[in-house]
Protein backbone atom coordinates (compact mmCIF):
# COMPACT_ATOMS: atom_id res chain seq x y z
CA UNK A 1 0.00 0.00 0.00
CA UNK A 2 1.10 3.57 -0.66
CA UNK A 3 -0.78 5.30 2.16
CA UNK A 4 0.28 8.81 1.27
CA UNK A 5 -1.93 8.83 -1.83
CA UNK A 6 -4.96 8.23 0.39
CA UNK A 7 -4.08 9.83 3.71
CA UNK A 8 -1.76 12.68 2.82
CA UNK A 9 1.91 13.18 3.51
CA UNK A 10 1.72 14.51 7.08
CA UNK A 11 1.97 12.14 10.04
CA UNK A 12 2.20 12.33 13.81
CA UNK A 13 4.64 9.42 13.97
CA UNK A 14 6.68 7.76 11.24
CA UNK A 15 8.44 4.52 12.15
CA UNK A 16 11.23 3.20 9.98
CA UNK A 17 11.40 -0.59 10.36
CA UNK A 18 8.54 -3.09 10.48
CA UNK A 19 10.27 -5.57 12.77
CA UNK A 20 9.57 -6.40 16.41
CA UNK A 21 10.46 -2.98 17.84
CA UNK A 22 8.81 -1.05 15.01
CA UNK A 23 5.53 -2.95 15.19
CA UNK A 24 5.36 -2.58 18.95
CA UNK A 25 6.10 1.13 18.67
CA UNK A 26 3.30 1.43 16.12
CA UNK A 27 0.83 -0.26 18.46
CA UNK A 28 1.82 1.95 21.39
CA UNK A 29 1.55 5.14 19.32
CA UNK A 30 -1.71 3.97 17.73
CA UNK A 31 -3.25 3.46 21.16
CA UNK A 32 -2.59 7.15 21.76
CA UNK A 33 -4.66 8.00 18.66
CA UNK A 34 -1.60 9.14 16.75
CA UNK A 35 -1.58 9.04 12.95
CA UNK A 36 1.11 6.41 12.45
CA UNK A 37 2.95 5.28 9.33
CA UNK A 38 5.43 2.38 9.28
CA UNK A 39 7.98 2.29 6.45
CA UNK A 40 10.13 -0.67 5.43
CA UNK A 41 12.27 -1.40 2.40
CA UNK A 42 11.28 -5.08 2.66
CA UNK A 43 8.17 -6.56 1.06
CA UNK A 44 6.52 -7.57 4.33
CA UNK A 45 6.69 -7.09 8.08
CA UNK A 46 8.33 -9.18 10.78
CA UNK A 47 10.63 -11.36 8.66
CA UNK A 48 13.08 -11.88 11.51
CA UNK A 49 10.31 -12.64 13.99
CA UNK A 50 8.96 -15.30 11.63
CA UNK A 51 12.23 -17.27 11.59
CA UNK A 52 13.15 -16.80 15.24
CA UNK A 53 13.30 -19.78 17.55
CA UNK A 54 13.41 -22.16 14.61
CA UNK A 55 10.06 -20.79 13.46
CA UNK A 56 8.49 -21.19 16.91
CA UNK A 57 9.56 -17.75 18.19
CA UNK A 58 11.26 -17.58 21.58
CA UNK A 59 9.25 -14.41 22.17
CA UNK A 60 10.40 -13.54 25.70
CA UNK A 61 12.14 -14.69 28.84
CA UNK A 62 10.39 -14.27 32.17
CA UNK A 63 13.78 -13.68 33.81
CA UNK A 64 14.50 -10.57 31.74
CA UNK A 65 16.60 -8.09 33.72
CA UNK A 66 19.58 -5.89 32.94
CA UNK A 67 22.02 -8.63 33.99
CA UNK A 68 21.07 -10.51 30.81
CA UNK A 69 22.07 -7.67 28.50
CA UNK A 70 25.36 -6.36 27.18
CA UNK A 71 25.77 -2.60 26.86
CA UNK A 72 28.35 0.08 27.43
CA UNK A 73 25.66 1.59 29.66
CA UNK A 74 24.61 -1.60 31.50
CA UNK A 75 21.56 -0.35 33.43
CA UNK A 76 20.06 1.63 30.54
CA UNK A 77 17.51 -1.10 29.73
CA UNK A 78 15.99 -1.25 33.24
CA UNK A 79 13.40 1.48 32.70
CA UNK A 80 12.07 0.04 29.43
CA UNK A 81 11.91 -3.50 30.81
CA UNK A 82 9.86 -2.20 33.74
CA UNK A 83 7.61 -0.11 31.50
CA UNK A 84 6.77 -3.09 29.30
CA UNK A 85 7.69 -6.37 30.97
CA UNK A 86 7.61 -9.96 29.73
CA UNK A 87 4.27 -10.31 31.54
CA UNK A 88 2.81 -7.48 29.47
CA UNK A 89 3.68 -9.28 26.25
CA UNK A 90 2.40 -12.56 27.67
CA UNK A 91 -0.90 -10.81 28.46
CA UNK A 92 -1.07 -9.63 24.84
CA UNK A 93 -0.69 -13.22 23.60
CA UNK A 94 -3.26 -14.45 26.11
CA UNK A 95 -5.76 -11.86 24.91
CA UNK A 96 -5.42 -13.23 21.37
CA UNK A 97 -5.54 -16.89 22.39
CA UNK A 98 -1.99 -17.71 21.30
CA UNK A 99 -0.72 -20.77 23.16
CA UNK A 100 2.86 -21.07 24.34
CA UNK A 101 5.13 -23.14 26.57
CA UNK A 102 8.24 -22.74 28.66
CA UNK A 103 11.21 -24.61 27.24
CA UNK A 104 13.77 -23.94 29.95
CA UNK A 105 14.96 -21.18 32.27
CA UNK A 106 12.06 -18.85 31.56
CA UNK A 107 12.26 -19.18 27.76
CA UNK A 108 8.78 -19.00 26.26
CA UNK A 109 7.99 -20.37 22.78
CA UNK A 110 4.81 -20.51 20.70
CA UNK A 111 3.07 -23.87 20.60
CA UNK A 112 2.34 -23.07 16.98
CA UNK A 113 4.38 -20.90 14.64
CA UNK A 114 6.13 -17.55 14.92
CA UNK A 115 3.96 -16.17 12.13
CA UNK A 116 1.09 -16.13 14.64
CA UNK A 117 2.88 -13.38 16.53
CA UNK A 118 3.60 -11.42 13.36
CA UNK A 119 -0.09 -11.63 12.45
CA UNK A 120 -1.13 -10.61 15.97
CA UNK A 121 1.03 -7.50 15.75
CA UNK A 122 -0.20 -6.62 12.26
CA UNK A 123 -3.83 -7.13 13.24
CA UNK A 124 -3.32 -4.89 16.28
CA UNK A 125 -1.77 -2.23 14.07
CA UNK A 126 -4.57 -2.36 11.52
CA UNK A 127 -7.24 -2.20 14.23
CA UNK A 128 -5.61 1.00 15.48
CA UNK A 129 -5.46 2.56 12.03
CA UNK A 130 -1.70 2.22 11.60
CA UNK A 131 -0.65 2.45 7.94
CA UNK A 132 2.22 0.67 6.21
CA UNK A 133 4.38 1.33 3.16
CA UNK A 134 6.51 -1.64 2.10
CA UNK A 135 9.22 -1.66 -0.55
CA UNK A 136 9.88 1.93 0.47
CA UNK A 137 13.43 3.26 0.26
CA UNK A 138 14.41 6.24 2.43
CA UNK A 139 16.54 8.58 0.33
CA UNK A 140 16.83 11.49 2.71
CA UNK A 141 15.94 12.45 6.28
CA UNK A 142 16.08 16.10 7.33
CA UNK A 143 15.15 17.90 10.56
CA UNK A 144 12.96 20.96 10.18
CA UNK A 145 10.81 23.24 12.31
CA UNK A 146 7.81 20.88 12.07
CA UNK A 147 9.74 17.71 12.88
CA UNK A 148 11.27 15.64 10.10
CA UNK A 149 11.07 15.62 6.33
CA UNK A 150 11.60 12.27 4.58
CA UNK A 151 12.23 11.90 0.89
CA UNK A 152 11.29 8.33 -0.02
CA UNK A 153 11.06 6.23 -3.17
CA UNK A 154 7.26 6.51 -2.95
CA UNK A 155 6.42 10.03 -1.78
CA UNK A 156 7.77 12.90 0.36
CA UNK A 157 6.65 12.70 3.99
CA UNK A 158 6.50 15.04 6.96
CA UNK A 159 6.26 13.82 10.55
CA UNK A 160 6.31 15.32 14.01
CA UNK A 161 8.16 12.33 15.47
CA UNK A 162 10.49 9.78 13.87
CA UNK A 163 11.25 6.36 15.37
CA UNK A 164 14.24 4.43 14.04
CA UNK A 165 13.61 0.70 14.55
CA UNK A 166 15.66 -0.69 11.69
CA UNK A 167 17.57 -3.35 13.62
CA UNK A 168 21.23 -4.21 13.22
CA UNK A 169 23.33 -6.03 10.62
CA UNK A 170 22.42 -9.62 11.52
CA UNK A 171 20.64 -11.73 8.88
CA UNK A 172 21.34 -9.55 5.82
CA UNK A 173 19.32 -12.01 3.70
CA UNK A 174 16.26 -10.78 5.58
CA UNK A 175 17.06 -7.19 4.69
CA UNK A 176 19.31 -6.03 7.53
CA UNK A 177 21.24 -2.84 6.81
CA UNK A 178 23.22 -0.21 8.68
CA UNK A 179 20.55 2.45 8.01
CA UNK A 180 19.86 3.13 11.69
CA UNK A 181 23.52 3.62 12.51
CA UNK A 182 23.86 6.02 9.59
CA UNK A 183 20.89 8.11 10.75
CA UNK A 184 22.38 8.33 14.24
CA UNK A 185 25.70 9.50 12.82
CA UNK A 186 23.95 11.98 10.51
CA UNK A 187 22.41 13.68 13.54
CA UNK A 188 25.63 13.64 15.55
CA UNK A 189 24.87 10.76 17.91
CA UNK A 190 27.71 8.52 19.01
CA UNK A 191 27.66 4.85 18.03
CA UNK A 192 29.64 1.79 19.00
CA UNK A 193 30.93 -0.20 16.04
CA UNK A 194 28.59 -3.16 15.50
CA UNK A 195 29.81 -6.75 15.51
CA UNK A 196 28.13 -10.16 15.15
CA UNK A 197 26.78 -11.63 18.40
CA UNK A 198 25.17 -14.95 19.35
CA UNK A 199 27.16 -16.46 16.52
CA UNK A 200 29.26 -19.63 15.89
CA UNK A 201 33.03 -19.31 16.16
CA UNK A 202 35.67 -20.34 13.63
CA UNK A 203 38.86 -22.26 14.39
CA UNK A 204 42.21 -22.26 12.58
CA UNK A 205 43.23 -24.95 10.10
CA UNK A 206 45.43 -26.74 12.62
CA UNK A 207 42.60 -27.20 15.11
CA UNK A 208 40.09 -28.04 12.39
CA UNK A 209 42.34 -30.79 11.07
CA UNK A 210 42.39 -32.41 14.51
CA UNK A 211 38.71 -31.86 15.25
CA UNK A 212 37.37 -32.70 11.78
CA UNK A 213 35.99 -36.13 12.87
CA UNK A 214 33.89 -34.40 15.55
CA UNK A 215 31.59 -32.44 13.19
CA UNK A 216 28.06 -33.04 14.46
CA UNK A 217 29.10 -34.14 17.97
CA UNK A 218 27.35 -32.27 20.80
CA UNK A 219 27.75 -32.35 24.56
CA UNK A 220 27.03 -30.32 27.69
CA UNK A 221 29.92 -28.04 28.66
CA UNK A 222 30.80 -25.00 30.71
CA UNK A 223 32.48 -22.19 28.77
CA UNK A 224 34.11 -19.11 30.24
CA UNK A 225 35.82 -15.93 29.14
CA UNK A 226 37.35 -13.80 31.87
CA UNK A 227 34.56 -13.43 34.47
CA UNK A 228 31.71 -14.52 32.19
CA UNK A 229 30.59 -18.12 31.87
CA UNK A 230 27.73 -20.28 30.60
CA UNK A 231 26.70 -23.91 31.03
CA UNK A 232 24.90 -25.31 28.01
CA UNK A 233 25.51 -27.53 24.99
CA UNK A 234 28.40 -27.22 22.54
CA UNK A 235 28.32 -28.44 18.96
CA UNK A 236 31.42 -29.22 16.92
CA UNK A 237 31.06 -28.12 13.28
CA UNK A 238 33.17 -28.49 10.16
CA UNK A 239 34.21 -24.85 10.61
CA UNK A 240 34.62 -24.59 14.36
CA UNK A 241 32.31 -24.44 17.38
CA UNK A 242 28.61 -23.72 17.79
CA UNK A 243 25.72 -24.62 20.08
CA UNK A 244 24.04 -22.47 22.76
CA UNK A 245 27.10 -22.29 25.04
CA UNK A 246 29.29 -20.98 22.22
CA UNK A 247 26.64 -18.57 20.93
CA UNK A 248 26.36 -17.11 24.42
CA UNK A 249 30.09 -16.59 24.93
CA UNK A 250 30.53 -15.25 21.39
CA UNK A 251 28.77 -12.03 22.38
CA UNK A 252 31.57 -11.32 24.86
CA UNK A 253 34.50 -12.58 22.76
CA UNK A 254 37.02 -10.39 20.95
CA UNK A 255 39.59 -11.57 18.39
CA UNK A 256 42.69 -12.95 20.10
CA UNK A 257 40.98 -13.89 23.36
CA UNK A 258 41.14 -17.39 24.80
CA UNK A 259 37.96 -19.26 25.65
CA UNK A 260 38.10 -21.95 28.34
CA UNK A 261 35.89 -25.00 27.94
CA UNK A 262 35.15 -27.65 30.54
CA UNK A 263 34.11 -30.76 28.63
CA UNK A 264 33.03 -32.49 31.87
CA UNK A 265 31.56 -29.65 33.96
CA UNK A 266 30.12 -31.96 36.61
CA UNK A 267 33.23 -34.04 37.16
CA UNK A 268 36.76 -33.36 38.42
CA UNK A 269 38.58 -35.68 36.03
CA UNK A 270 41.82 -35.74 38.04
CA UNK A 271 40.00 -37.04 41.13
CA UNK A 272 38.06 -39.50 38.99
CA UNK A 273 41.28 -40.89 37.48
CA UNK A 274 42.83 -41.34 40.91
CA UNK A 275 39.77 -43.21 42.15
CA UNK A 276 39.73 -45.34 39.00
CA UNK A 277 43.34 -46.28 39.63
CA UNK A 278 42.40 -47.65 43.03
CA UNK A 279 39.46 -49.60 41.63
CA UNK A 280 41.07 -51.07 38.48
CA UNK A 281 44.70 -50.21 37.87
CA UNK A 282 44.74 -52.12 34.55
CA UNK A 283 42.20 -49.87 32.84
CA UNK A 284 43.57 -47.33 30.36
CA UNK A 285 42.87 -43.59 30.38
CA UNK A 286 41.41 -44.00 26.92
CA UNK A 287 38.93 -46.56 28.22
CA UNK A 288 37.95 -44.24 31.06
CA UNK A 289 37.45 -41.30 28.70
CA UNK A 290 35.16 -43.32 26.44
CA UNK A 291 32.81 -43.86 29.40
CA UNK A 292 32.65 -40.14 30.10
CA UNK A 293 32.73 -38.37 26.72
CA UNK A 294 31.22 -38.98 23.29
CA UNK A 295 33.33 -41.77 21.79
CA UNK A 296 34.78 -39.74 18.92
CA UNK A 297 35.80 -36.95 21.29
CA UNK A 298 37.28 -39.40 23.79
CA UNK A 299 39.43 -40.97 21.06
CA UNK A 300 40.76 -37.60 19.87
CA UNK A 301 41.65 -36.54 23.43
CA UNK A 302 43.37 -39.87 23.92
CA UNK A 303 45.34 -39.52 20.69
CA UNK A 304 46.52 -36.06 21.70
CA UNK A 305 47.72 -37.24 25.09
CA UNK A 306 50.08 -39.86 23.70
CA UNK A 307 50.00 -41.98 26.86
CA UNK A 308 46.28 -42.72 27.06
CA UNK A 309 46.59 -46.35 25.95
CA UNK A 310 48.79 -47.21 28.91
CA UNK A 311 47.19 -48.73 31.96
CA UNK A 312 46.38 -46.11 34.54
CA UNK A 313 48.85 -47.78 36.88
CA UNK A 314 51.61 -46.75 34.46
CA UNK A 315 50.50 -43.10 34.44
CA UNK A 316 52.02 -40.59 36.82
CA UNK A 317 50.02 -37.97 38.72
CA UNK A 318 51.51 -35.39 36.38
CA UNK A 319 50.15 -37.26 33.37
CA UNK A 320 46.73 -37.66 34.99
CA UNK A 321 46.70 -33.93 35.68
CA UNK A 322 47.66 -33.29 32.08
CA UNK A 323 44.68 -35.36 30.96
CA UNK A 324 42.35 -33.55 33.39
CA UNK A 325 43.56 -30.16 32.16
CA UNK A 326 42.87 -31.19 28.57
CA UNK A 327 39.29 -32.11 29.46
CA UNK A 328 38.30 -29.78 32.32
CA UNK A 329 40.32 -26.78 31.17
CA UNK A 330 40.52 -26.97 27.38
CA UNK A 331 41.69 -23.64 26.00
CA UNK A 332 40.83 -22.53 22.49
CA UNK A 333 41.48 -19.29 20.59
CA UNK A 334 38.96 -18.83 17.76
CA UNK A 335 40.12 -16.87 14.73
CA UNK A 336 36.78 -15.19 13.93
CA UNK A 337 33.02 -15.49 14.10
CA UNK A 338 30.92 -16.87 11.26
CA UNK A 339 29.67 -13.34 10.66
CA UNK A 340 26.39 -11.51 10.30
CA UNK A 341 24.97 -14.10 7.90
CA UNK A 342 24.27 -16.48 10.78
CA UNK A 343 24.52 -14.14 13.80
CA UNK A 344 21.25 -13.89 15.69
CA UNK A 345 21.86 -10.25 16.65
CA UNK A 346 24.35 -7.42 16.34
CA UNK A 347 26.29 -6.11 19.30
CA UNK A 348 26.98 -2.36 19.53
CA UNK A 349 24.95 0.40 17.92
CA UNK A 350 23.65 3.79 19.01
CA UNK A 351 25.23 4.84 22.30
CA UNK A 352 22.43 4.59 24.86
CA UNK A 353 23.95 7.52 26.74
CA UNK A 354 22.69 9.62 23.83
CA UNK A 355 19.10 8.43 24.48
CA UNK A 356 16.62 8.92 27.32
CA UNK A 357 16.06 5.58 29.06
CA UNK A 358 12.52 6.68 29.97
CA UNK A 359 11.38 7.72 26.47
CA UNK A 360 13.96 6.34 23.97
CA UNK A 361 14.21 9.88 22.57
CA UNK A 362 17.51 11.37 21.48
CA UNK A 363 18.86 13.79 24.06
CA UNK A 364 20.25 15.94 21.24
CA UNK A 365 17.51 15.82 18.60
CA UNK A 366 13.94 16.34 19.90
CA UNK A 367 11.44 14.05 18.21
CA UNK A 368 14.01 11.45 17.13
CA UNK A 369 13.65 8.04 18.80
CA UNK A 370 15.57 4.76 18.60
CA UNK A 371 14.29 1.30 19.56
CA UNK A 372 15.37 -2.32 19.36
CA UNK A 373 18.59 -3.82 18.07
CA UNK A 374 19.85 -0.54 16.60
CA UNK A 375 20.57 0.60 20.18
CA UNK A 376 23.67 -0.57 22.07
CA UNK A 377 21.71 -3.17 24.07
CA UNK A 378 22.30 -6.83 23.23
CA UNK A 379 20.53 -9.65 25.02
CA UNK A 380 21.80 -13.09 25.84
CA UNK A 381 20.32 -16.14 24.12
CA UNK A 382 16.84 -17.17 25.22
CA UNK A 383 14.21 -14.57 24.32
CA UNK A 384 15.94 -11.53 25.82
CA UNK A 385 16.49 -9.74 22.51
CA UNK A 386 12.86 -9.92 21.46
CA UNK A 387 11.81 -8.70 24.89
CA UNK A 388 14.13 -5.71 24.47
CA UNK A 389 12.47 -5.04 21.11
CA UNK A 390 8.98 -5.17 22.65
CA UNK A 391 9.99 -3.03 25.63
CA UNK A 392 11.99 -0.36 23.84
CA UNK A 393 9.48 -0.20 20.97
CA UNK A 394 6.60 0.25 23.39
CA UNK A 395 8.38 3.04 25.27
CA UNK A 396 9.26 4.86 22.05
CA UNK A 397 5.68 4.58 20.81
CA UNK A 398 4.31 5.77 24.15
CA UNK A 399 6.35 8.96 23.96
CA UNK A 400 6.70 9.83 20.29
Image (cartoon, rainbow, N blue to C red):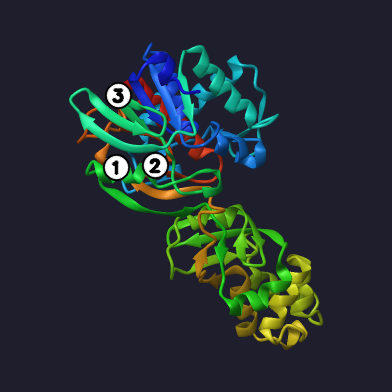
- Image quarter for residue 184? top left
Q: Position of residue 44 (x, y in %)?
A: 55, 32
Local secondary structure at mark 1 = helix
Q: Are marks 2 and 1 in contact (CB under 8 Å)?
A: yes
Which residue matches tag 2?
374
Q: Residue at x 60, y 18 (%)?
A: 94
Q: Position of residue 318 (x, y in %)?
A: 60, 84
**10 Å crowding of disc 3: few (<14), some (14-19), many (20+):** many
Q: Decide which of tag 3 and tag 2 comes sooner along the chain.
A: 3
Left or right, 94 with reference to 294: left
Which residue matches tag 3?
158
The correct choice, above or below, for 287 with respect to 375 in the image is below
Left or right, 287 with reference to 76: right
Measured in 3D between alpha carbons, the distance from the residue under mark 2 to the one under mark 1, in whole angstroms, is: 10 Å
Local secondary structure at mark 2 = helix
- Image quarter for residue 284? bottom right
Q: Position of residue 211 (x, y in %)?
A: 67, 73
Q: Decide which of tag 2 and tag 1 comes sooner along the chain.
A: 1
In the image as oriented, which residue stretches furthest toward the left? 145
Which residue matches tag 1?
184
The correct choice, above or below, for 348 with respect to 312 in the image is above
Q: Decide which of tag 3 and tag 1 comes sooner along the chain.
A: 3
| Quarter of the image where the C terminus is located | top left
Measured in 3D between alpha carbons, the distance from the residue under mark 3 to the one under mark 1, in whole angstroms, is: 19 Å
Q: Which mark is residue 394?
A: none
Local secondary structure at mark 3 = strand
Q: Nearer the viewer, residue 197 or 246?
A: 197
Amino acid sequence: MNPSTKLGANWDVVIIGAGAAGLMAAIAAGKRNKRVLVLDHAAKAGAKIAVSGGGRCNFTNTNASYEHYISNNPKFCISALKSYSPWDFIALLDSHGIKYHEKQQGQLFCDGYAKQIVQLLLDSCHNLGVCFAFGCQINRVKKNSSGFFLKTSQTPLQTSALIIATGGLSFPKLGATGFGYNIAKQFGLKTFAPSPALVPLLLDKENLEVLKPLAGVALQVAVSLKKTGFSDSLLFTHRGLSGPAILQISSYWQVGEIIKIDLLPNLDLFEHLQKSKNVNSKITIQAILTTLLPKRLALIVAQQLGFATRSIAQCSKKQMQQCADRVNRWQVTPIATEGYGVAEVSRGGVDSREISSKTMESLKIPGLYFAGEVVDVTGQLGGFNLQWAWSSGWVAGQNA
